Amino acid sequence: MITASGSLGLLFPPSLPVILYGVISNTRIDDLFIAGIIPGFLMMFAVAAYAFWRGIRLGAPRRQFTAREVAGAVWEAKCELLLPFLVIGGVYTGMFAVSEIAVIAVVYVLVVEMIVHCEVGLRDFGSVSRESAILSGGILIILGMALAVTNYMIDAEIPDRLFDLASGYMTSKVAFLLALNIFLLIVGCMIDIYAATVLIVPLIIPIADKFDVDPVHLGIIFIVNLAIGYVTPPLGLNLFIANMLFREPVIKLYKAALPFIFLLLLVLLAVTYIPWLSLLFLKRP
């Protein structure tokens, strides 16, 4: 269950893959996060429902629910729990742009960690800032190279050539989306999501546009596919991480992950062929 659910957060703020996809595809990032609400919760519900049913069948031990323990845990995590509401509420209500809420979130975390919890002191601030700068610099380099590759592909008319090639084998939007899902599932289990976003997104966006696929809908399909790819045998990254952490044979993890993959694929089909699951909350002219 942990292995299968490890990548479900990719659709929710402040997901870096969603932000990266938005930058490379020139799609509004807040629209992508809004569009990911229903698909994200559908994926969570599918994994949780199967785990619940499986736990009952295996006779897993249960612990009596007590409201006092829940209240105590919520109170201990009160500062951390406020952050998602701050980010999501600020973006979805239109009070702040994504760039503005990013700065606000950083200031909030600094105040909580340095003043409220006192877990980061003034002596640690320099090292934390340096590590953050290195991470941000790496992301900016990736973005710069991604935009360069995108511009080259457009100038070389590579997407148009790919569309001409694809149109010879498929003539309908349904066939294109099916082929796209198969392709992205293979990519997702073999290539890191950031590399896949940089390499694949510039290629599929013009082709999807030819088949009248909404760019926001395409973004959700892309992220859901790569999230499933993390647990898809034989090369899903989460499977090998679980292999190291739980010290279980990879083949055993393959078998255990199959029911979860099947349910997530059903959600993927629903998200792919029922566009309003992604576009319901978007304000369109």
Image (cartoon, rainbow, N blue to C red):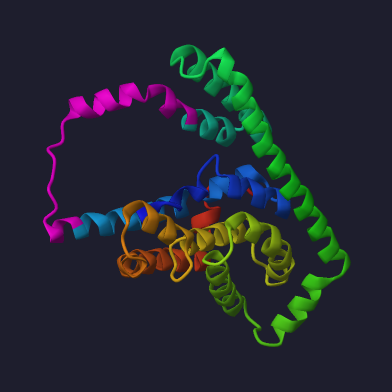
Q: Residue at x 19, y 25 (%)?
A: 68
Q: Where is 27 relative to 81, above or below? A: below
Tell me which residue sits at (46%, 14%) in the image: 118
Magenta residue check for 81:
yes
| x and y, in percent, of residue 152 in the image | 85, 62
| Foreground of the two, 41 or 212 | 41
Up the image or down, 264 lies above or below 2; here it is below
Quarter containing the N terminus: bottom left
Q: Residue at x 41, y 28 (%)?
A: 81
- Residue 164 counted in the magenta span: no
The answer to whether 226 appears left or right of 259 in the picture is right
Q: Which residues are magenta?
A: 55-83
The one of 41 and 278 positioned closer to us in this rendering: 41
Q: Is residue 208 visible?
A: yes
Q: Quadrant of residue 90?
A: top right
Q: Is residue 1 visible?
A: no
Left or right placement of residue 62 versus residue 248 in this view: left
> What is the x, y in percent for residue 181?
54, 71
* Direction from residue 220 to residue 24 in the image, left or right: right
Q: Residue at x 66, y 87 (%)?
A: 169
Q: Main secondary structure of the magenta part?
A: helix
Indicate the quadrant where residue 99 lies.
top right
Residue 28 appears at what percent x and percent y? 67, 46
Q: Position of residue 61 (x, y in %)?
A: 12, 48
- Counting every numbered tag in the picture gives 0
- The single residue placed furthest to the bottom in the displayed view is 168
